[in-house]
Image (cartoon, rainbow, N blue to C red):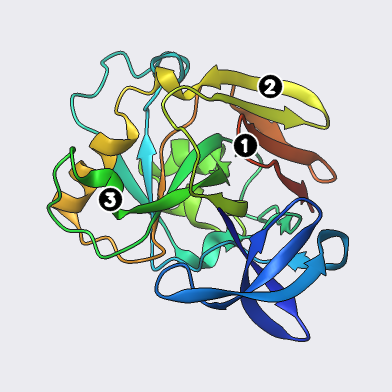
């Protein structure tokens, strides 16, 4: 299934995305729900972020080629974690706002994991039982501020710096999917999730040993090489094979 959140008549509602329409749910995919017989054409709706997470747990330096380009000469034995605040989350087709504090804002295409139920100290073998599905994410980063601060909270925490969506796919195979970033239609990043250093099941398990993951929380699994700057007026797309494209503009 492909779960999404939309705005309809001023209300935020969950739906299932189908071929050219979305079908209204009574309830939430993070709990109990049932399908209704109410449909809305996709062309007539506005997407919200597919979840409203309590936190976005992001993984740094999780592709070897990206580690090389960022001059991290040692591959980390354990995942490098940081947090993006819930206020950074925006939806498909919403605008990324260029902050006045920064002179360089970069794209980072990532596969995102969405948690289904409370998750604490789970094993790698059981980890995927706690996952609702997967979606696209852009870990937008003020690269100049990251270099100045020597840690990542400000650089990655601005409002609008975490586009997610457009929907959560429960049937996605995360093990070897092509991942790309297109800037104004030109491919800038291209890799496969098979090149992750720490895989999705291992990430869920490791993070759950650090902090409790709540329903709707998001794990950003890291970006491949090819990161680069965006300018005001640019259109940026995260494209992951088997998932729908996440598209945002910069203003």
**Of 16 and 217, the residue lying toward us:** 16
Q: Residues within 10 Å of mark 2 (few under 14, many from 20)?
A: some
Marks 2/1: CA–CA distance: 9 Å
Q: Do we see residue 240 in this rendering?
A: yes
User: SS class of the residue under badge 1?
Assistant: strand
Q: For this view, does 110 lie left or right of residue 150?
A: right
Q: Residue furthest bottom?
A: 10
Circles 2 and 3: CB atoms closer than 8 Å: no
- The correct choice, above or below, for 192 with respect to 121 in the image is above
**Residue depicted at 52% across the width and 67% down the height:** 87
- As helix, strand or loop, the secondary structure at mark 3 comes to helix
Asked if residue 202 is positioned above or below residue 66 in the image, the reply reads below
Q: Are marks 2 and 1 in contact (CB under 8 Å)?
A: yes
Q: CA distance from mark 1 to mark 3?
A: 31 Å
Q: Residues within 10 Å of mark 3 (few under 14, many from 20)?
A: few
Q: Which structural element holds mark 2?
A: strand
- Residue 102: x and y in percent read 62, 47
Residue 172 drawn at (x, y percent): 50, 38
- Report which residue position mark 2 lands on: 188
Of callouts 2 and 3, which one flags the residue occurring earlier in the amino acid sequence?
3
| Quadrant of the image occupied by residue 63 | top left
According to the picture, the residue beneath numbered tag 1 turns out to be 107
Q: Residue at x 73, y 63 (%)?
A: 22
**Residue 129: assigned label:** 3
Disc 2 or 1, which lies upstream in sequence? 1
Please tell me whether mark 1 or mark 3 is closer to you in this view. Answer: 3
Q: Residue at x 87, y 60 (%)?
A: 43
Asked whether the viewer can see residue 225, the reply is no
Q: Which mark is residue 173?
A: none
């Amino acid at each position: 299934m492909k779960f999404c959140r939309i705005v309809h008549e001023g209300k935020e509602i969950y739906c299932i995305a189908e071929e050219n329409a979305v079908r209204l749910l009574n309830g939430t995919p993070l709990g109990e729900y049932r399908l209704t017989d109410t449909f809305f054409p996709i062309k007539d709706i506005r997407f919200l972020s597919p979840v409203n997470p309590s936190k976005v747990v992001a993984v740094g330096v999780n592709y070897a080629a990206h580690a090389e380009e960022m001059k991290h000469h040692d591959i980390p034995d354990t995942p490098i974690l940081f947090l993006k605040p819930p206020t950074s989350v925006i939806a498909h087709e919403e605008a990324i706002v260029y902050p006045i504090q920064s002179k360089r804002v970069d794209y980072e295409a990532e596969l995102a994991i969405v948690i289904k139920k409370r998750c604490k100290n789970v094993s790698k073998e059981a980890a995927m039982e706690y996952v609702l599905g997967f979606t696209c994410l852009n870990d937008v980063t003020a690269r100049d501020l990251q270099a100045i601060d020597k840690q990542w909270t400000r650089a990655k925490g601005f409002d609008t710096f975490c586009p997610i969506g457009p929907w959560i796919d429960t049937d996605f195979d995360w093990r070897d999917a092509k991942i790309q970033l297109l800037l104004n239609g030109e491919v800038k990043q291209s890799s496969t999730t098979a090149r992750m250093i720490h895989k999705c099941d291992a990430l869920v398990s490791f993070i759950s040993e650090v902090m409790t993951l709540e329903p709707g929380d998001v794990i950003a699994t890291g970006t491949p090489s090819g990161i680069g700057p965006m300018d005001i007026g640019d259109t940026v797309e995260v494209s992951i094979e088997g998932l729908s494209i996440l598209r945002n503009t910069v203003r």
